[in-house]
Image: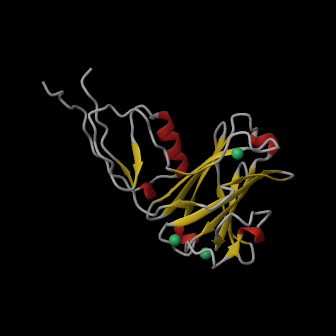
Amino acid sequence: MTPRRIGLCLLIAFIGTFTTSTIVNSLKENSEAMVFLYGAEREQSEEKHTSALILPTIITDPLGDSNEQVDVIEIAGASSGAELLMEVTFSPDTDIVASEAGGAILLDLDQNSSTGKSATEIWFGLSTQDVGCEFLLSLYPDHVEVREAEMSTIVATLPVTQTANALSFSVPLSLLNNDEGQINVVAIIGDKDGPTDWAPEVGYGTITGSYLHFIPVIMKPE
Ligand SMILES: [Ca+2]
Ligand SMILES: [Ca+2]
Ligand SMILES: [Ca+2]
């Protein structure tokens, strides 16, 4: 007999109505009950979905490749129609507060490395980090500064949510030249004394502009 599906619900929510901390905290607290996907709906399956994708991973970086204490391992990000949402995850032994972990996140809004500032023009970026950034984010444990890249002018200071080994935040796209949300990204991560890790060291990660959806949570009968 074909298993009867129960508990099928489809909630499509524009994330712009939530704050980042609400999203992240809610998803972490409800990871067993909620599947959070970004962009196009993925194929439904007969399996019970138990894993939660909080934000899509756009950059992974090796664990243990930093000579210093601050070691980034993942950057996740997505955009809704109104906001850029990001989360920077550090190694479990990174002490975010003691190290004053943070860094510079370079945003290539037009996805064109020949426009804007190159990574080498921004705080010890690498020549192999292939962006031309129009904006950058100066990340600290408790806040993030949105800077226009050309003159490094601060256009806004926004709150950061800190968890055990990650920092997350949201930036209204209205602060980023009303970008449509497709953005190439590289990061120069560091501590209070300087850079300690780069992500990625070659190329870039890409945030894809689309709406965020809650999609069906399908559960089999026990
Ligand atoms: Ca690393
Ligand atoms: Ca550019
Ligand atoms: Ca764009």
The residue positioned 36% from the left and 34% from the top of the image is 49
Left or right: 202 with respect to 219? right
Left of 213 or right of it: where is 75? right
Left or right, 22 with respect to 195, comes to: left
Furthest residue in direction left, as rendered: 1
Residue 7 location (% of width, % of height): 25, 33
The image's colour scheme reads secondary structure
Residue farthest top in this picture: 222
Residue 129 coordinates in the image, percent (x, y) = 68, 63
Image quarter where the N terminus lies is top left
**Residue at (57%, 71%) from the top-left corner?**
109
Query: In which quadrant of this rendering is ligand 1 seen?
Result: top right
The image shows residue 51, relative to residue 55, as above or below, that is above
Percent coordinates x, y for residue 186 in the rendering: 65, 60
Q: Quadrant of residue 156?
A: bottom right
Asked if residue 181 is positioned above or below residue 117 in the image, the reply reads: above
